[in-house]
Amino acid sequence: MNVSEFDFNLPETLIAQHPIEPRDASRLMVLNRVSGGIEHHRFRDLVSLLRAGDVLVINNTRVIPARLIGEKEGTEGKIEVLLLRRLELNIWEALVKPGKRLKVGQKVLFGGGILIGELLDILDNGNRKIQFTYSGVFETILDTLGQMPLPPYITAQLEDQERYQTVYSKESGSVAAPTAGLHFTAELLGDLRKKGIEIVEILLHVGLGTFRPVKVENIEDHPMHSEYYRVDLEAAEHINRAKQEGRRVIAVGTTAARTLETVGNDQGKVVPGAGWTDIFIYPGYAFKVVDVLLTNFHFPKSTLIMLVSALAGRELTLKAYELAVAERYRFYSFGDAMLIL
């Protein structure tokens, strides 16, 4: 399939710059992939839209303050380092800007030397391998010196850093939020449980590859990024029991969907485990575990809209996106949501 088949016109004014308050006041488009029907709701209506017995699968990853601003040792040259993933205890794969200014063996001082990064190598993909030295606990230092790595299309300043975290975030490791989960409040989760909806936690640490454009014409030639996931035995048992009993499994976000499809076998059974996934889901893919998807509105020609199209069908997905533009839904990380039944 050609990447141009997933294009649509998106006015820049529809890219949400600020999170809506309260979280569950965002709009929710409900798309029925069987009838083709489209309804408009608020996110808090999710309680009435789901059924008792449904299993809601959430990604409990937490975004780390991965953006570090420092100075090249011996100069006043500003260097920005964006942590991507931990390779060893004190060695990270990172993006460096400006990359040409820092040579292998040179160091960057953060916080006046509280944290020191040394460039060890330039990787084949253009990213950098950096080793950090410090006294104390790295995560504590990062909380002090680091900034939230907001996506490049969000230019407004975020006053409350927790608004780029889900209310159920637990395990630090992502450099981008699983944004479909940003709409939930603790109260809404409580109401869902009261209705008899199971909430199951899994983990996928979101990488920046989520935002990288597809640069090839044939989407099958696109090299998918790799992300760490974990699904424990208890989560797998809850999901498998639901599948056996004919109850729906609802993935909150493309990250949960990709994880579930990674650990699902050909019989639709979830096999617990941990590892790295580079699964790429696009039309033609047969979903093994996911029955319903809750997601935000995504980039034109992105791997995320391709995943949505794999579940809902490309034509119906683009029809829904055209309507979302016409109805002025808010797009991307701080935008509105879509429920695909």
Image (spheres, grey):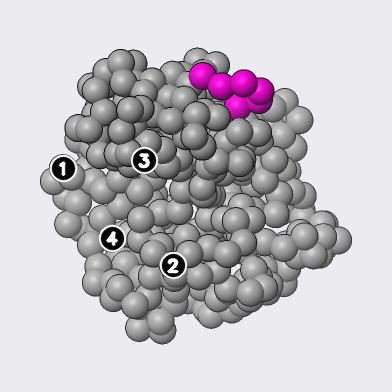
How far apart are labels 1 and 4 at the CA level? 14 Å
Q: Are marks 3 and 1 in contact (CB under 8 Å)?
A: no
Q: Residues within 10 Å of mark 4 (few under 14, many from 20)?
A: many
* Foreground label between 1 and 2: 2
Which of the 4 quarters of the picture holds residue 42? Answer: bottom right
Residue 338 in the image: state x and y as whole percent.
51, 66
| Residue 121 in view | no
The amino acid type, in three-letter code, at marker 2 is Ala
Q: Nearer the viewer, mark 3 or mark 1?
A: 3
**In whole angstroms, how far apart are the C-alphas of marks 4 and 3?**
28 Å
Instruction: Give the image location of residue 289, x and y in percent.
Output: 56, 40
Pick the front one: 327 or 282: 327
Q: Which mark is residue 80?
A: 3
Q: Which residues are magenta?
A: 133-138
Name the residue rendered at 69%, 27% in the picture: 232
In the picture, the disc for residue 289 is none
Q: Is residue 332 above or below residue 303?
A: below
Query: In the rendered image, which residue does mark 1 sit on?
Result: 216
Decide which of tag 2 and tag 4 comes sooner along the chain.
2
Instruction: Measure how far apart labels 3 and 1 are at the Cα level.
Output: 29 Å
Query: Circle 4 is placed at which residue position?
Result: 300
Residue 107 placement, left or right of 338: left
**How packed is label 1: few (under 14 Cα within 10 Å), some, or many (20 or more)?**
few
Which residue occupies 30% across, 52% down? 302
- Marks 1,2: beta carbons within 8 A: no
Q: Earlier in the sequence, mark 1 or mark 2?
A: 2
Q: Are marks 4 and 3 in contact (CB under 8 Å)?
A: no
Residue annotated with mark 2: 156
Cα gap from disc 2 to disc 3, whole angstroms: 19 Å
Count the numbered circles shown: 4
Q: Amino acid at mark 4?
A: Pro
